[in-house]
């Protein structure tokens, strides 16, 4: 089944919203649905489309998987509260960290995140709520890369021949699947979401697990989480499509206070892109790179190396995992 792309340039956001609301409402009928909101532009747009279509028949959850950035659940809950949408936080940290324990292979890590989300957490939420539908924000780029076998994006099933109803016991609706990121931003703006959401940098479903090379332990997540706060803070004004900090698996010899320190390596990536299909590293000023290095070395314990990624996508991909 080929998906008919709607390019951002030809997208009529108001008409698109009207059509998707009609379709969601028709498909769910008198039933109920759930959706998971991470606070990114895709899941935020789906949350508002779903609430427009279903009102209280849609229950929205924030899944605290232990892989999120600093302060994320509180921020997302408060924002949507101000938009009149109730968001319930589900603590699934132990399940996700348990599933990732011991895994180092990138695709195995992605698969563990996928199974934990869809089989365990959503499976349980669907049972508890009596819902038969999950609404989610898969976009066309997620599908393309997964089908091409480049990267198993966490939210792609039908196009891989997986029937979610058989595999997990519920149907998945994907109202944004004909769009790319630039199109979703237009829809999010037309839905009345604030610029902090429709202009927000993308963040991947596997979250910080995509930015820890090697095993995703709570200790290693804490390091990358700290480096992420600094990176996003210092690069907020760079106008980039996306920026990130990555923790490497290998350690290298460094020195602190005259002593040897076999320390961690953090890699910074900052991308210019329109739709994530192609991307080039942002030409950051040297002073910005120095500031990043200075703060990461001073504030993230045990880090002795900070590097900046300069290869384009392709052949690189944007996330490290
Ligand atoms: P890559 O790393 O494939 O990333 O070049 C392209 C864009 O997709 C985001 N990304 C994901 N988004 N689920 C998502 O919803 C995923 O599993 C996933 N993996 C990567 C990535 O952050 C970038 O914006």
Image: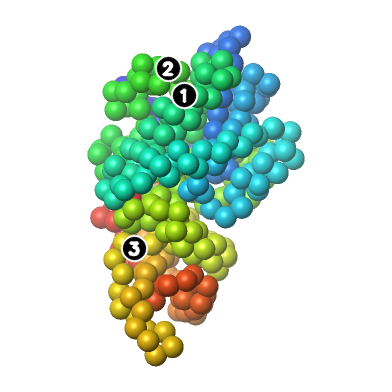
C-alpha separation, residue under disc 1 versus residue under disc 2: 7 Å
Dividing the image into 4 quarters, which one contains the N terminus? top left
Counting residues from the N terminus, which is met first, the one under dot 1 or under dot 2? 1
Element type where label 3 sits in the image:
loop
Image coordinates of residue 250 in percent, x first then y, are 29, 66
Q: Could you classify mark 1 by the number of other residues whose Cα lies within 10 Å: few (under 14), some (14-19), or many (20 or more)?
A: some
In the image shown, does 258 or 285 lie closer to the viewer?
258
Q: Which numbered tag is attached to residue 248?
A: 3
* Residue 206, quarter of the rendered image: top left
Q: Is residue 221 left or right of residue 151?
A: right
Image coordinates of residue 10 in percent, x first then y, are 49, 35
Residue identifier under label 1: 123
* Residue 205, quarter of the rendered image: top left
Q: Is residue 22 left or right of residue 79?
A: left
Whether residue 242 is visible, yes or no, is yes
Instruction: Give the residue at x 44% y 29%.
Output: 120
Q: Could you classify mark 2 by the number of other residues whose Cα lies within 10 Å: few (under 14), some (14-19), or many (20 or more)?
A: some
């Amino acid at each position: 089944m080929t998906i008919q792309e709607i390019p951002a340039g030809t997208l009529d956001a108001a008409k698109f919203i009207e059509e998707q609301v009609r379709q969601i409402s028709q498909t769910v009928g008198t039933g109920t649905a759930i959706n998971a909101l991470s606070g990114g532009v895709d899941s935020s747009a789906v949350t508002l489309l779903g609430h427009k279509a279903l009102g209280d028949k849609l229950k929205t959850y924030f899944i605290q998987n232990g892989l999120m950035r600093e302060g994320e659940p509180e921020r997302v809950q408060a924002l949507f509260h101000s938009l009149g949408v109730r968001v319930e936080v589900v603590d699934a940290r132990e399940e996700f960290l348990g599933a990732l324990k011991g895994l180092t292979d990138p695709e195995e890590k992605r698969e563990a995140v996928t199974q934990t989300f869809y089989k365990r957490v959503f499976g349980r939420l669907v049972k508890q709520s009596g819902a038969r539908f999950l609404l989610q924000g898969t976009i066309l780029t997620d599908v393309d890369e997964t089908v091409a076998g480049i990267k198993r994006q966490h939210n792609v099933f039908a196009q891989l021949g997986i029937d979610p109803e058989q595999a997990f016991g519920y149907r998945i609706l994907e109202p944004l699947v004909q769009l790319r990121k630039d199109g979703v931003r237009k829809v999010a703006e037309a839905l009345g979401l604030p610029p902090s959401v429709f202009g927000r940098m993308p963040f991947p479903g596997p979250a910080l697990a995509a930015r820890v090379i090697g095993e995703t332990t709570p200790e290693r997540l804490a390091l990358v989480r700290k480096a992420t706060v600094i990176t996003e803070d210092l690069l907020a004004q760079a106008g980039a499509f996306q920026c990130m900090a990555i923790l490497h698996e290998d350690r290298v010899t460094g020195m602190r206070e005259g002593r040897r320190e076999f320390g961690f390596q953090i890699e910074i990536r900052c991308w210019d892109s329109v739709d994530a299909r192609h991307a080039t590293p942002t030409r950051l000023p040297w002073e910005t790179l120095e500031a990043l290095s200075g703060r990461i070395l001073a504030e993230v314990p045990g880090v002795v190396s900070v590097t900046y990624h300069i290869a384009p996508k392709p052949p690189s991909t944007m996330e490290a995992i």
